[in-house]
Amino acid sequence: MDLVLTESQLRRVFSELERANAAQAGRLRGQIGDRHPVHTVYGGAQLFRAETIEKLGEYARSHFQTYGVDAATFAAAIGLQSTDPEDQNWLENTVFERVKAKLHREAVEDFRVDFEDGFGFRADAEEDEVAKKVADEMARALKANRLSPFIGIRIKSLSEETKKRSVRTLDLFLARLLNESGGVIPPGFVITIPKTACIEHVQAAADIFDMLETHHKLPAGALKLEIMIETTTALLAADGRSPLSSMIRAGRGRIVGVHFGTYDYTAHCDVAAPMQAMSHPAAQFALQWMKVAFAGEAVALSDGASNTIPVGPHRIKDPGPQLTPEKLQENTKAVHSAWRVCFQNIQNSLRNGFYQGWDLHPGQIPVRYAATYSFFLDGLAPATQRLRAFVDRASQATLSRQTFDDAATGQGLLNFFLRAYHCGAMTSDELQRTGLTLKDIESKSFFKIVDAKIDS
């Protein structure tokens, strides 16, 4: 049969589709940017010192050595299982050795000095002094190169009750920090605002940051914002619309991260306290809503924290008598139980596409890396084969002037390897088994890799 629709009839329709498709391709680009941390460690502002991050690393290493002992013990404690039983020993040993190396090299990737829940409500004079003290200590750590690669502070929310206190703390802290550091902001520095419930909260933060930058003669956009989704109104406003994607525009390029507050959010959903958990359906619903709303945006999404702390019931007092074998065993049992909960929560986050979460205690840090590394390593062989095949297919399609319509999957595979390499889960040798060079992979673009292969 002859065609019914003519080229002239379809010209307008195809032109509109071209514009719409270009807009979609620009937004849903699927690329990840520079390195993102796999966790954020929180600590009360009143406790922060220049040595804090190093001490957290020491504690994490000690906890790992005491309760992890060896590869088999650690794997059994956290519930590490390979999808291929023949790879179990390899996975256990590889994860154990890489976690150990990571804890010695860089135990804490991101740290947040907390003026909210971890600090509480105190007299204004006391919070003023702590804000300045934190600035002094952060400047001292910056000069001595003792900060984590990513660092920041969490102020109180911009709700009516705490907005003045929140801005005052930020104002005092930033002025003191810049004075003590010679006008230098630490690399990877962010300001976290909890309970971001509406677009106006983001607009206000951006306006305040503008004023601070102008006063301190900082480059425009130097102050970066991290918002927290902890209320139901952040997902659905009174007018029936979701404000999430509009928050990015309201931030005027400042938002670099969006974190989920598991326990405040589930409390907003009237979930009873004993039932509040990362795995609760209410939390999972909110997280997937975030994934949809922020798809393609250049922001890092983070899940929340396991609130099961890996600490035994018996404390060793020094000086004092040593614990009995029975008490030591009870401590080990408690730590291993908490580790397993933490491991399961992190693995679930990773399966749902959340590559960052919170650690509330240094004893959780070894499990963070174990869960993350095992996630990437367990899928290494099939992902390697798939990426090689995708690059070959895309190159052939381009050479023959055909359309390769699976580029999103190819970009997703590339992102898998980028994240694995950045966090220390994979070595450069393992990455290059894909047939790509480290330079290829760090281009961060599947299309650029394909074009380079064709040109070569």
Image (cartoon, helix red, strand yellow):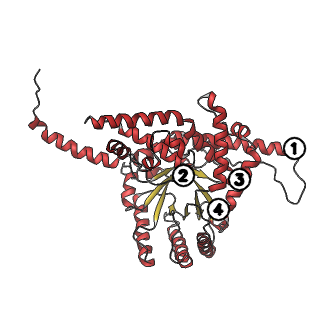
Rendering quarter of residue 343: top right
**Label 1 vs label 4, nearer the camera:** 4
The residue indicated by pointer 4 is: 53
Q: Residue at x 9, y 33 (%)?
A: 6
Residue 268 visible, this angle? no
- Residue type, label 4: Ile
The residue indicated by pointer 3 is: 61
Q: Nearer the viewer, residue 217 or 333?
A: 217
The residue indicated by pointer 2 is: 261
- Residue type, label 1: Pro
The residue indicated by pointer 1 is: 325
Determine contact: label 1, label 4, CB under 8 Å: no
Q: Is 212 above or below relative to 317? A: below
Q: Mark 4 or mark 1, which is nearer the start of the sequence? A: 4
Residue 88 visible, this angle? yes
In-image side of 151 versus 403 (left or right)? right
Which SS class for mark 3? Answer: helix
